[in-house]
């Protein structure tokens, strides 16, 4: 199955996230508005970490990003109070290269097995193609959250 259009959507979403990142200061990226439990930077890091967990870890392959990155932004985590500009730039640096690597690995047929799970939304993910498609859904939800957060910075 060709996933050109699915990867195209993912690249476009990451372009939008990069534009938001680039338009804000570190202070704005880290601001947690009243009524929210996270910030823009955490949401950007989260979509990267979840993509790595969905596609790589569940396929039994090491993630492209360091384990420490995944641990900081995995589901159930919260933003750190102390993020440096260098650490924020690391988050930004993973926006496109993770998707490029995933597309390359997919085309090279590196994903041979998959650990099935059911997402909170009820979507059953039982292969890497569904994981890549579901990832776009997940990233779209977080783009909406980020746009809401942006109104308060």
Image: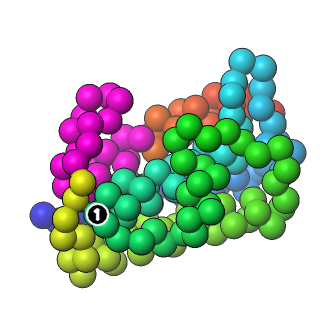
Residue 126 left/right relative to 92: left
Residue at the far top in the pictured view: 35
Q: Residue at x 33, y 78 (%)?
A: 104
Relative to 141, residue 4 above or below: below
Q: Please state, as top left, top right, bottom left or bottom right, where the N terminus lies in the image.
A: bottom left
Q: Residue at x 48, y 72 (%)?
A: 64
x and y, in percent, of residue 49 in the image: 52, 55
Residue under numbered circle 1? 59
> Is 81 in the magenta?
no
Relative to 16, residue 92 above or below: below
Residue 24 left/right relative to 103: right
x and y, in percent, of residue 127 in the image: 19, 55
> Is 119 in the magenta?
yes
**Which residue range is magenta in the image?**
116-138
Q: Residue at x 76, y 63 (%)?
A: 87
x and y, in percent, of residue 128 in the image: 24, 59
Q: Residue at x 22, y 48 (%)?
A: 116
Quarter of the image for residue 137 reads top left
């Amino acid at each position: 199955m060709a996933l050109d259009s699915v990867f195209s959507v993912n690249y476009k979403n990451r372009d939008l996230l990069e534009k938001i990142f680039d338009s804000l200061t570190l202070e704005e990226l880290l601001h947690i508005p009243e009524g929210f439990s996270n910030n823009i930077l955490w949401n950007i890091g989260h979509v990267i970490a979840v993509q790595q967990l969905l596609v790589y870890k569940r396929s039994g392959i090491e993630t492209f990003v360091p384990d420490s990155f995944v641990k900081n932004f995995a589901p159930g985590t919260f933003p750190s109070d102390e993020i440096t500009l260098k650490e924020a730039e690391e988050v930004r640096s993973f926006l496109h290269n993770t998707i490029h690597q995933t597309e390359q690995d997919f085309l090279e047929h590196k994903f041979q097995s998959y650990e099935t799970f059911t997402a909170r939304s009820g979507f059953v993910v039982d292969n890497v193609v569904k994981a890549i498609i579901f990832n776009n859904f997940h990233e779209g939800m977080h783009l909406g959250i980020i746009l809401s957060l942006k109104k308060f910075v």
